[in-house]
Image (cartoon, rainbow, N blue to C red):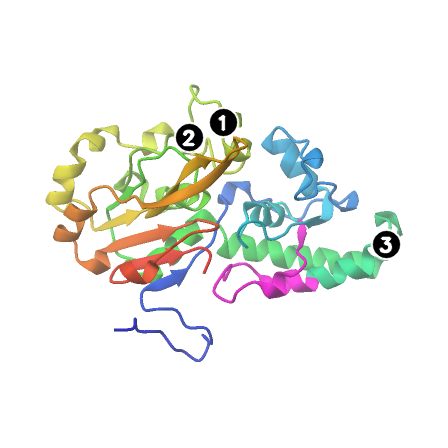
């Protein structure tokens, strides 16, 4: 039987029932209060050119975007990219060629039409020096940067994304939530930033197991050694936001239905392999849902939520759409 699809007047590209688009997000505290003064037309940080990745701290990296009117970004392995959010959160306009080619169910919360306007505006101004911009041109840039910044603050924070998930799954009233991660210690922007968002909505009633340690503040972690130098997604939460005592009772708490919902922060992953040159690549698609056999005997299908935050994946989400499945790249 083919999965049911949701047809609405607004949705011309329906997804299977209980499958929803999702994207990255950014902590609200990382978003500037207003568009900063600008000293350059285009950021010198160029995606795909490692020699321009000269920033070792989050502050220096963010300042590059704060002082730039525009900054380049692009599709990498997936359309969604943390850089898009970091640019917008710092009052900068993304210059994103080919964004029109993005699939309609991918990056649905990103202000695509505003970015398209930004692309056209940059093309008109790209041969100018910032000091040569007219007052009309400056006002157009400022207005657009403000519109994008306001959208980011309203729609793209980690808290807003957590609320989006619960609204789509019709579980806005859930009080206690168990958040299970795969048994690998890899970083995952979608999963890790949603942890931050849910902690802001539910506090210790949202329990991540195993603990995603680098999202919490610690003196024992070298955050700079993590993916992307740990910028944006690490060192965010106070240690008290994790109730360590709950870690030892996970199985019993599932059996006793202590939590209203169970969320799998990433329901599948790839093992990392090496090619003949010693280079890492993703291989061996595996499902990673600890306690799933137990969970599905205790919880109703609609009380289980699955996330897929991968760029390139073999995501058989229709296999699990008896649950609520959120997929980043569709």
Mark with earlier residue (2, 3)? 3
Q: Residue at x 44, y 19 (%)?
A: 219
Horizontal side, residue 237 vs residue 50: left or right: left
Q: What is the crowding at mark 3: few (fewer than 14 residues within 10 Å), some, or many (at least 20)?
A: few
Is there a contact, CB below 8 Å, between mark 2 and mark 3? Answer: no
Q: CA distance from mark 2 to mark 3?
A: 43 Å
Q: Earlier in the sequence, mark 2 or mark 1?
A: 2
| Quarter residue 68 falls in | top right
Name the residue tied to disc 3: 127
Label 2, secondary structure: give it: helix
Residue 285, percent from left and from top: 36, 46
Please give the residue where the numbered disc 2 appears in the rendered image. Answer: 214
Give the quarter of the image for residue 135: bottom right
From the image, tell me which residue sits under label 1: 223
Q: Examine the rendering and report whether any part of residue 266 can be seen.
A: no
Bounds of the magenta segment: 92-117
Say whether residue 78 is magenta.
no
Q: Can residue 175 be seen at all in this image of the molecule?
A: yes
């Amino acid at each position: 039987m083919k999965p049911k699809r949701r047809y609405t007047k607004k949705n011309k590209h329906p997804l299977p029932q209980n499958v929803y688009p999702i994207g990255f997000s950014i902590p609200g505290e990382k978003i500037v209060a207003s568009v900063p003064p600008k000293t350059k037309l285009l950021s010198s940080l160029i995606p795909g050119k490692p020699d321009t990745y000269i920033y070792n701290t989050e502050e220096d990296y963010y300042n590059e975007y704060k002082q730039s009117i525009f900054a380049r970004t692009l599709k990498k392995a997936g359309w969604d990219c943390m850089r898009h959010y970091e640019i917008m959160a710092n009052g900068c306009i993304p210059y994103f060629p080919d964004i029109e080619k993005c699939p309609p169910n991918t990056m649905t919360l990103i202000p695509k039409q505003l970015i398209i306007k930004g692309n056209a505006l940059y093309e008109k101004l790209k041969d100018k020096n910032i000091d040569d911009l007219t007052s009309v041109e400056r006002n157009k840039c400022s207005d657009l940067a403000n519109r994008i910044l306001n959208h980011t603050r309203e729609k793209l924070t980690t808290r807003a994304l957590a609320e989006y998930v619960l609204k789509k799954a019709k579980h806005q009233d859930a009080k206690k939530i168990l958040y299970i991660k795969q048994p690998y210690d890899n970083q995952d922007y979608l999963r890790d930033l949603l942890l931050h968002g849910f902690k802001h909505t539910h506090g210790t009633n949202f329990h991540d197991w195993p603990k995603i340690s680098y999202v919490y503040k610690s003196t024992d972690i070298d955050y700079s050694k993590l993916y992307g130098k740990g910028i944006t997604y690490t060192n965010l939460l106070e240690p008290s936001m994790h109730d360590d005592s709950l870690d030892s009772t996970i199985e019993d708490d599932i059996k006793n239905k202590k939590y209203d919902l169970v969320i799998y922060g990433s329901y599948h992953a790839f093992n990392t392999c090496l090619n003949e040159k010693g280079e890492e690549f993703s291989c061996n698609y595996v499902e990673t849902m600890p306690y799933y056999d137990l969970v599905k005997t205790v919880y109703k299908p609609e009380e289980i939520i699955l996330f897929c935050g991968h760029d390139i994946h073999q995501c058989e989400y229709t296999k699990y759409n008896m649950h609520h499945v959120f997929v980043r790249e569709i």
